[in-house]
Image: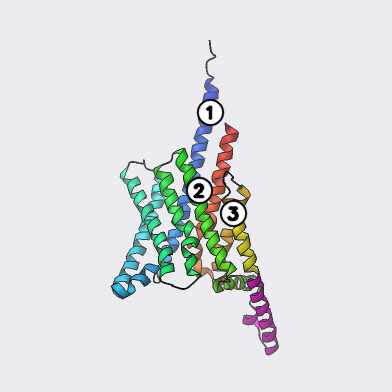
Amino acid sequence: MPPSPNPLKLEECFIKLHDLFVMSNRILFFLRLLVLIQFLGYAAKLDGPSALNSFLLVSMGDPFVSIFDRAVQVFIWFACTALLIFGIVNPSVHSMARRIDFSILGLFTLWSFSVAILSWIINPGNPFHATDPAGHAVRFAAPLALLLLTAFPEKGNIRRVEWLLRWGVAGTFVGHGLCALWLKPSFVDLIIGTMNLFLGDPVFTAVSFQDLEEALTIAASRQAFAESALPIIAIQDFILVALLLLPGKRIKTIALWMAVWGFVTATSRMTAYGWDHWHDLALRICNGGVPLFLWAHWNSLESKKISS
C-alpha cells in the first residue's frame, strides 16, 4: 500500500508555489511601472510638437495637429493612472477593466511604434534618425510584452515574450551603437555635458583671458575624449547584443550590465542638460529597465529550479 502524502509537506509545497506566483506578479508589475514611467515621458514631451504632428502638419494644418497633440497628452495622463490602478487591483482576464487595460497597452504600443517610424520618415537623409525604428525598439516592445504576458500567461508564451524583449533591447543597443560609431553630435554633447557637471565647466568659470585659453584647451580635450570614447562604446554595445541573443543561453551578467549601462545613458540626459530634462530620462527608462526585467525573470527561473 503506497504511503499517504504528508500534509505538512504538501502545505510547504503550496507555500513555495504561492511565493513563486507572487514573485512573478512582482516582476510583471515592475514591467508595468516601466511602461507607465516611459509614457509619462511621452506625455511630457508632447508639450512640444510630436513626430506625428510634424508629419500631419502640411496636410492637416497647425490648429488640428496642435489640438491632436494635446488630446493625446491628456489621454496618456489618464491612461497611465488607469494602468497603475489595474496593476494594483489585478482584475480577471475576462473583465471589462482588463479589456480596457489591454486596449491601453495596445494603443501605447501603436503610439511608440508610430513615433519611431515617423521620426525616421520626417527626417529623410538623416542617418541618425534612420536608426530610430531600431533605437526605439524597446519602447514599443515593452507595452506589447506586458499586453501578451497579461493576456496569455501560458509558459510557452512567456518564452516567446522573453525573446520579444531580447530583440527589443538588442534593437535599441544596435541603434544607439550605430549612432555612437557615427559620432552623433548629441551623444558627444552628453559626454561633455556630464563631464562638465562633475568636473566643472572650464569656460563658464574662466575669469581672465589666460583662464579662458586654458578653459578652451580643456574643452577641446574633453571633445576629443568624447569622440574617442564613442566608437569604443559602440563596439561594447554590439558585443553585448551578440551575447544577449545567443540561442539557448541566459547570461545574467550581460543582462545586468546592459541594465546598468541603459540607466547610465538615460540619466546622462539630465546630467548633461539639467533636471528639467527628466522626461528624457523617463522616455528612456526601458533602455535599462527591460534588461533588468530580464535579469529578474532569469533569477526567478533559477529559484524555481532550486525549489523543485
State the SS at label 3: helix
State the SS at label 1: helix
Could you tell me which residue is drawn at 51 percent across and 53 percent down? 167
Which numbered tag is attached to residue 225?
none
Depth order, front residue of 31/180: 180
Tell me which numbered mark, 3 or 2, is placed earlier along the sequence: 2
In the rendered structure, does residue 169 fall within the stretch colored magenta? no
Residue behind mark 1: 13
Q: Is residue 275 left or right of residue 199?
A: left
**Residue 125's spot in the image, x, y percent?**
46, 73
Q: Are marks 2 and 1 in contact (CB under 8 Å)?
A: no
In the rendered structure, does residue 204 fall within the stretch colored magenta? yes
Q: Nearer the viewer, mark 2 or mark 1?
A: 2
State the SS at label 2: helix
Which numbered tag is attached to residue 163?
2
Say how the picture is coloured.
Answer: rainbow
- Give the alpha-carbon distance from disc 3 to disc 1, as whole Å: 39 Å
The residue type indicated by label 2 comes to Trp
Q: Do the residues labelled 3 and 2 touch (CB within 8 Å)?
A: no
From which residue to which does the magenta span run?
201-228
Depth order, front residue of 193/166: 166
The reply to whether residue 267 is in sight is: no
- Give the alpha-carbon distance from disc 3 to disc 2, as whole Å: 13 Å
**Residue 208's spot in the image, x, y percent?**
67, 88
The residue type indicated by label 1 comes to Cys
The reply to whether residue 184 is in sight is: yes
Could you tell me which residue is drawn at 47 percent across and 47 percent down? 161
Query: Which quadrant is the C terminus positioned in?
Result: top right
Which numbered tag is attached to residue 242?
3
